[in-house]
């Protein structure tokens, strides 16, 4: 499992301040995020062990995500999709599209459903 995060947002949320706080993920913050991801996914994994990668990424995350997948010899990438169209897609970009076009592994794109959009 991999989670790419904005280093500045996560470092500040953990109380870090000062120069460079937005450029690289602090080790203690990385460990905290690692533990949280494992805790949140324990039911899904049914107690099976999992490799977890937490990485800081600035800007678009499609290339760093495919890079993490290649580094870890992933067979499958699962990414979500907001299903944006038109101006919103142009403005926000599409991580799932970038992953689909850049990944060497198989990719599954799961559409996101907001609250009130059914089960």
Image (tube, rainbow, N blue to C red):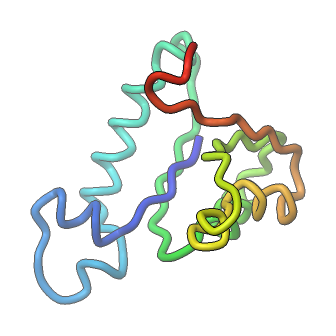
Residue 16 falls in image quadrant: bottom left
Q: Residue at x 60, y 35 (%)?
A: 112
Q: Residue at x 87, y 63 (%)?
A: 101
Up-down: is 43 above or below 87?
Answer: above
User: Where's residue 2, x and y in %?
Assistant: 57, 47
Residue lying at the far front in this picture: please name it.
86
- Location of the N terminus by quadrant is top right
User: Where's residue 57, x and y in %?
Assistant: 49, 70
User: Where's residue 72, x and y in %?
Assistant: 71, 52
Up-down: is 91 above or below 33?
Answer: below
Q: Residue at x 75, y 44 (%)?
A: 77
Say which of 82 and 110 sits in front: 82
Residue 88 falls in image quadrant: bottom right
Say which of 51 and 119 sits in front: 119
User: Where's residue 90, x and y in %?
Assistant: 66, 72
Say which of 20 and 58 sits in front: 58
Up-down: is 93 above or below 1?
Answer: below
Drawn side of residue 75 relative to residue 53, left or right:
right
Drawn side of residue 102 relative to residue 119, left or right:
right
- Location of the C terminus by quadrant is top right
């Amino acid at each position: 499992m991999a989670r790419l995060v904005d280093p500045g947002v996560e470092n500040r949320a953990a109380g870090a301040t000062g120069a460079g706080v937005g450029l690289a993920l602090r080790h203690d913050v990385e460990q905290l995020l690692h533990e949280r991801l494992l805790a949140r996914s324990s039911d899904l994994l049914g107690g099976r062990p999992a490799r977890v990668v937490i990485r800081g990424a600035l800007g678009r995350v499609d290339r760093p995500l495919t890079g993490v997948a290649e580094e870890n010899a992933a067979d499958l990438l699962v990414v979500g999709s907001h299903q944006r169209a038109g101006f919103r897609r142009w403005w926000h970009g599409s991580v799932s599209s970038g992953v689909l076009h850049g990944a060497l592994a198989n990719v599954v794109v799961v559409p996101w459903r907001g609250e009130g959009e059914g089960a």
